[in-house]
Structures are given as structure tokens and as C-alpha cells.
Image: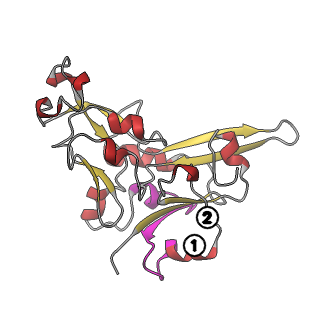
Amino acid sequence: MAKKYAFLVDLRRCVGCNSCQVSCKMENGVPVGNFRTRVGTGDVGSFPDAKRFFLPQFCNHCDKASCLPVCPVPGATYQKEDGNVVVDRNLCIGCGKCVDACPYGARFMHPHIPIKNDPKPFFAKVPELKNQPKASLRVVDKCDWCEDRRAQGFADPACVANCFGKALVFGDRNDPESRVAKLIAAEKTVVLFPDLGTKPQVLYIAPDPAVFRAAELQINDE
């Protein structure tokens, strides 16, 4: 059976240390002010019943990703057979349509990487680029499950490898012996914005649904 990657966040183990966010920035050279991985913090209640929640967030590598159909350049953003949604920097023309289409805020324009592809053949689909000099356009960036790192032989993305609480789990959900497959089978998992029908491949074990209300995110029946 072909590999089908999934990413699981066990909120029972997350302590809000931000090591996933820091590791991601270091591994991928994410510029200041932008994030591939981010940890949201939310406070609910008041003393003596106050609670603080942490919500790690990533690209959801959706099976039906809303970023894919809006891209005007074939192959500039695409999904691999294993589920990884990636950006081809050689083809991206920096129009930002995929950034606007992502309901998870998982994409951004990389301020330091200019586009290589000529946007002129695509002006009919993105007329707003006609008045922008090519030199001003920047490629889109996002989490790709540390594809370059894994190509070098590392099993996990940097965020997973550096999560000392073992709250992050990455692996092949089609492999019944993988930790991620076992957790998905054994635990109730939820996804962000299920009503959108994007079928995210980032799943959460969330013992207290207040974490999503604190972060102003809709989840399943909430």
C-alpha cells in the first residue's frame, strides 16, 4: 500500500514550549515575522478557575486543499501521492491566490526569495500582476513536512524531532505499525474547520475542546 502521511498533535502532552516553532524556523530559514509552524496561546476563565491552552498549528496538507484549484500555474502548488502539499519555487509567480484561499493561514509570501517563472503568460488569470515589476514578486512558502530534511534520511520533520513532550507524531497512517496509525485508531481525533470539507491530514487529540474556543477556531461539533 502506498504511503499516506499524517501529522498528529496530542494536546494532552503539549506544554507550550514553542520548540516546534523555533525548530521549524531554524531548519527552514523562515524569516522574521513569518511562520511555517506556530503555537497559539489562549486563556479562558478567571482566577481561581483560569486555564491556559496551547494550540500548535501547521499546514494541514488537506486531501482536498483549497489552495490547489486557485493556483493559475499548473504544478506551482501540488499534492504528492503521499499527501504532502508542496510549492515549486521555480514555477510560483507570486500572485498570492493560494495564500488568500488557505483557511488555516498556513501560507505566506517569502520576503527574501524572488520568483523565477515569467508571470506574463498568466496575466489573463491574474491581471493584478500586470502592473507589478517581476523583481518585486516573491514566492509562496509553507510547511512541507521538512521534505528536504527527510530526503536526507531523517524520519521526522524538525518540529517532531525536537518536541520533548512527544506531543507531535508524524508518519504513514497506512502502516498499522506506525505510532501515528496506532494513535489514530485508538484515540478520538479531530481536525480544524471540518465543515469546509478540505479533509486535513493534521489531526488533534484534544481532551478539552475549550482550546479551540480560546483560539477562536471551529472544530467538529463546537
Position of 80 relative to 99 (above/below): below
Which numbered disc, 1 or 2, marks the residue closer to the eye?
A: 2
Give the residue at mark 2: 189
Q: Can residue 164 be seen in this view?
A: no
Q: Residue at x 50, y 71 (%)?
A: 180
Badge 1 element: helix
Amino acid carrying mark 2 in the image? Thr
Q: Report the front residue among 52 and 183.
A: 183
Residue 178 in picture, x, y percent from top left: 47, 77
Give the residue at mark 1: 183
Give the magenta range: 158-180
Q: In the orientation shown, which residue stands out farthest toward the top? A: 131
Query: How much space separates mark 1 and mark 2, taking CA atoms?
Result: 9 Å
Left or right: 126 in relation to 9? left
Give the numbered dot on residue 62. Answer: none
Which corner quadrant holds the N terminus?
bottom left
